[in-house]
Amino acid sequence: MDTESNGPAGGAQRIHASHVVETELAHLEWATRQPVDRMLSPGYWHRRVLAVKSGFELTQQQRQRIDAILSRIEAVLKRLDDRLRQGSE
């Protein structure tokens, strides 16, 4: 597995592992289309997506898929926030 330094000496390492990224993206795309689960909240999935985004060298297509997943999660978070606001009125 190739690694590339990202930033100054001692900075984060970004991994070139396309097969790992593809597997993660497929799982995240599937998981973020499922009904919200209390144990695996949208915040959990958001952190998982950001870990892939920051931990791997991504192709343009993979970055677009990440952006789409993040948009889907943000929409869910907004709906949940709207419901909470309506319930508190």
Image (cartoon, rainbow, N blue to C red):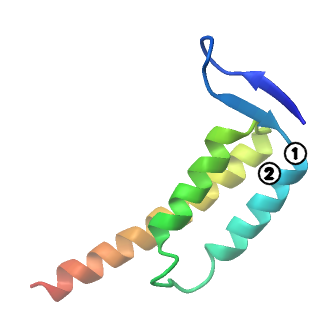
Q: Which residue is mark 2?
A: 21
Label at residue 18: 1
Query: Viewer-proximal residue, 35 or 24?
Result: 24
Q: Residue at x 24, y 81 (%)?
A: 84
- Secondary structure under the numbered disc 2 in the rendered image: helix
Q: Are marks 2 and 1 in contact (CB under 8 Å)?
A: yes
CA–CA distance in space, label 2 to label 1: 5 Å
Q: Residue at x 61, y 17 (%)?
A: 10
Give percent across and percent down for residue 40: 52, 76
Q: Is residue 83 above or below residue 1?
A: below
Q: Residue at x 80, y 38 (%)?
A: 59
Give percent across and percent down for residue 6: 67, 21
Q: Residue at x 62, y 39 (%)?
A: 54
Give percent across and percent down for residue 67: 61, 51
Please, what is the three-letter code of the amino acid marked with disc 1?
A: Ser
- Secondary structure under the numbered disc 1 in the rendered image: helix
Q: Residue furthest left?
A: 89
Please, what is the three-letter code of the amino acid marked with disc 2?
A: Val
Q: Is residue 40 above or below residue 22?
A: below
Left or right: 11 with respect to 1?
A: left
Q: Which of the image's four quarters has the C terminus?
A: bottom left
Quarter of the view holding residue 30 = bottom right
Q: Residue furthest front?
A: 10
Query: Viewer-proximal residue, 17 or 36?
Result: 17
At label 2, counting other C-alpha atoms closer than 10 Å, the crowd grade (few under 14, some 14-19, many 20 or more) is many
Left or right: 89 with respect to 71?
A: left
Give percent across and percent down for residue 69: 61, 61
Q: Which of the image's four quarters has the N terminus?
A: top right
